[in-house]
Image (cartoon, rainbow, N blue to C red):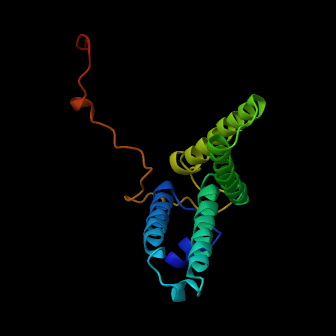
Amino acid sequence: MDYVWLLSGFKGRINRARYLVVQAALLTFWLVWLKFEFQLSSQWQALHLDWVAAITMIWINAATTVKRLHDRNRSGWWAAAILIVNRISYLYYGLFFGLYFGVDISTAKELLLVMLAVALSLLQTWIVIELFFLMGTDGPNRFGPDPMRTAPNSPIDSRAEPASVPDFLVCRAGPPPRS
């Protein structure tokens, strides 16, 4: 597998499993980075390694998300919309909890904030379903060949039809057929 293409390129398609593995690796790296970031000396922080790590992680996330969207036969530009929704959600929930715990606001504003929270949650839920649970388009699409197919009529083809059961092994309900 070409890891440079997987982690940095924006062309082609990847399936759900590869996308999930990359996203889990990014999450693990981020959690480990947070743990060690507090232990870094000020000399290392002066090098701005946190910005380098953040930009690298955003790039890898964008590249794999674009390829996953291509597998769903969607334009890669939807990845920008996903990034914007995630950032708005992050800012919104910070504002929502800050207002909820710190400032007295009117009931109308609270209702608006709750409605926006529900809308953002539904939108994020659809993003997760789209990227992690729905299968890609079967066969080649405008973004490239199907990543689940290795070669036509290959024994390794994961989407091949299951072999049929021989008739003598099928147990049929009802009376035996009459000759």
Badge count: 0
Q: Is residue 140 above or below residue 165?
A: below
What residue is drawn where x is 26% and y is 15%? 173
Q: Quadrant of residue 58?
A: bottom right
Q: Is 26 on the left or on the right of 177, as rendered?
A: right
Quadrant of residue 14 within the rendered picture:
bottom right
Query: Which residue is located at x 48 percent, y 84 percent?
Result: 41
Foreground residue among 71 and 89:
89
Which x, y percent locates residue 39? 44, 77
Q: Is residue 16 above or below residue 126?
A: below
User: Between 177 and 54, which is closer to the camera in this rendering?
Assistant: 54
Residue 46 horizontal/vertical position (percent): 59, 86
Q: Residue at x 33, y 38 (%)?
A: 164
Measured from the top left, where is residue 9 in percent x and y?
62, 73
Q: Is residue 122 above or below residue 65?
A: above
**The C terminus lies in which quarter of the figure?**
top left
Using the rendered view, name the quadrant where residue 69 is placed: bottom right
Q: Is residue 45 visible?
A: yes
Does residue 151 appear anywhere in the picture? no
Residue closer to the observer: 90 or 94: 94
The reply, left or right, for residue 120 in relation to residue 31 is: right
Picture residue at 61% right of the left edge, 62% below the top: 67
Look at the picture and state if 137 lies above or below 63: above
